[in-house]
Amino acid sequence: MRLRNIAGSREAIGESDFVIHEPENQKGNWQKIFGNNNPIHIEIGMGKGRFLMDMAKIHPSVNYVGIEKYSSVLLRALQKMEREEKPLPNVRFVRMDAETIEAVFGVEEVDRIYLNFSDPWPKDRHAKRRLPSREFLARYDKILKKDGWLEFKTDNEALFRFAVEELKPAGWKALGISYDLHHDDKMGQDNVMTEYEERFSSLGNPIYKYVIARDSR
């Protein structure tokens, strides 16, 4: 379903004012796009945009950039935005592959990164494609501010344990880890759910989450 092509999706994306076209030309200038000096938070693999938009409503003084690889999925986020009573001025979207993230954001331009229910890429030979892998952590290291952090949520236990094991060799440390987020009074406080999270948790599946930062040692 996620990979299904939707007729006209690329055209709709190309015409949207909420989508940043040729984002590599905006590197180092994201605050100018929003017209303020507010922090920049990005969600990589935003899906249909529920989490991003809910966060934008809760935190109007933060600028949010949603990154999505698939046109058909990004289209759903645009449709969701159009259904809003009032468009959210602190939200923009980018259609791109996360592997080129360094070409789109400048050094220390991002204050926070969210990874929510990322593709697990279960085969070992595809480990480098997993968004919480050491290869991607090296990319995030370049765009994230020194005092910034990254939050990752998933219902996939194998992917989560892989992600935790990647921290030390990648030079990152955990600020918080939960193996059952919705029953964790501390980590679960003020949790904003995604569409997938609501679906999976309703089936009784535990949600895993970590918050990480660079290890300064």
Image (cartoon, helix red, strand yellow):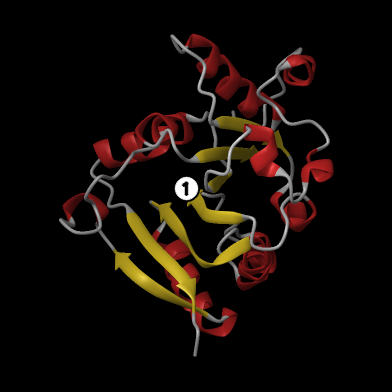
**119 lies left or right of 51:** right
Identify the secondary structure beneath mark 1. strand
Identify which amino acid the numbered label 1 is placed on: Asn
Residue at position x 53%, y 39% in the image: 63
- Is there any visible trace of residue 101 in the rendered image? yes
Count numbered badges in the picture. 1
Residue at position x 49%, y 70% in the image: 162
Kindly give the residue lying farthest to the front in the view shown: 36
Picture layout, residue 145 above or below residue 101: below
Residue at position x 46%, y 13% in the image: 84
**Where does the image place residue 150, in percent across and percent down from the top left?**
48, 60
- Is there any visible trace of residue 2 in the rendered image? no
Picture layout, residue 115 above or below residue 56: below
Residue 212, located in which quarter of the rendered image? bottom left
Q: Which residue is mark 1?
A: 116
Residue 195, located in which quarter of the rendered image? top left
Kindly give the residue lying farthest to the bottom in the view shown: 217
Within 10 Å of disc 1 (Cα), the crowding (few <14, some 14-19, many 20+) is many
**Where does the image place residue 96, in percent across and percent down from the top left?**
74, 41
Please tell me which residue lies in front, 46 or 102. Answer: 102
Residue at position x 65%, y 64% in the image: 136
**Where does the image place residue 184, in percent across and percent down from the top left?**
18, 57
Picture layout, residue 145 above or below residue 34: below
Quadrant where the N terminus sits is: top right
**Where does the image place residue 167, in percent across and percent down from the top left?**
50, 77
